[in-house]
Amino acid sequence: MNGETSGGRRDLDGKVVVVTGGSRGIGRSIVLAAVERGARVAFCARSMGEAAQDVHAEAERIGGTGRVFAMAADVSHRGDVDAFVDATLGVWGTIDVLLNNAAIDKDALLLQMPVAEFGTVLGINLTGPFLMSQRVLREFLRHDTPGVIVNIGSIFDRGAPSQTAYSTSKGGLRGLTHAIAEQYGPSGIRANLVVSGLVETELSRHMPAHFRKSVLSNPLARAGGTEEVASAVLLLAGRAGRAMNGATVYASGGIVDANFPG
């Protein structure tokens, strides 16, 4: 490495960045871009399978040995959250940035949505960020760290056909972000939201064709890339985002609300 990112700076040098859902899609791109910007990165995934091992290896190739730590954790369970945070602190002693990315989608129309599946989606997508933020906020306050939390939202957070649980979870995440920003901004802690549009990931591959057509009606007329969303996330996490708290940044090609055909 030559000490420069493609953007010409390493604005996360010396920072410890925690990423949830770091093995695939947007999470993978966040992990790799954060390492490239000089961070030490801890990421979790629900299993340390081939995808997670590949991210770990690629991150070390980019940043060098000892720049990344990974472990299996289900962020919807407090025990897993505590174990992941404790392990990160055991490796590096501190946390500077939390990036809540982990998300799933098991959706149906409201009248067809099983309660158990509704709870599972909210568990990962909303309770997970709550538990991670609650635990990491305690560390920020204990060590007087001007920490940063960035949550990954979606243009579907105001409702979409067959997106009962997913839309509910992402709408709640918007509210959680603003609550953190309001309550802990006076302590120097920032919380912001990045709202993505259609990004080609495993999560979006099952999207019906007419949904995809509607979302691709954004001014750029294309899907976003995972690296593009990661860039917006790390903008808020780094020095360039120091004045931003309670902000919503749209990495969605210019579309704010998805207008779906009937």
Image (cartoon, helix red, strand yellow):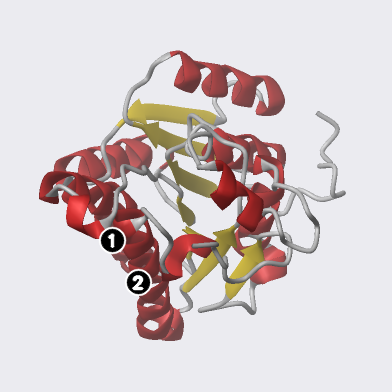
Q: Which of the labelled discs sits on residue 176, or is there none?
A: 2
Look at the numbered disc 2 and give the secondary structure of its residue: helix
Residue 136 in view: no
Three-letter residue code for mark 2 = Leu
Q: Which residue is drawn at 45% across and 46% down?
A: 18
Residue 248 in view: yes
Judge by depth and name the residue closer to the eye, 16 or 204: 204
Within 10 angstroms of label 2, few (less than 14), some, or many (20 or more) residues? many
Q: Residue at x 62, y 45 (%)?
A: 199
Image coords of residue 40 (percent x, y): 56, 39
- Left or right: where does residue 234 sit relative to residue 192? right
Q: Residue at x 35, y 79 (%)?
A: 179
Q: Name the quadrant containing residue 254.
A: bottom right
Q: Which residue is drawn at 82% across and 38% down?
A: 3
Where does label 1 land, which residue?
130
Sequence order check: which comes first, mark 1 or mark 2? 1
Q: Which of the labelled discs sits on residue 81, or is there none?
A: none
Look at the numbered disc 1 and give the secondary structure of its residue: helix
Image coords of residue 154 (percent x, y): 50, 59
Image coords of residue 159 (percent x, y): 41, 67
Above or below — where is 173 with respect to 83?
A: below
Within 10 angstroms of label 1, few (less than 14), some, or many (20 or more) residues? many
Judge by depth and name the residue closer to the eye, 87 or 77: 77
Three-letter residue code for mark 1 = Phe
Mark 1–mark 2 contact, CB under 8 Å?
yes
Count of numbered circles on the image = 2
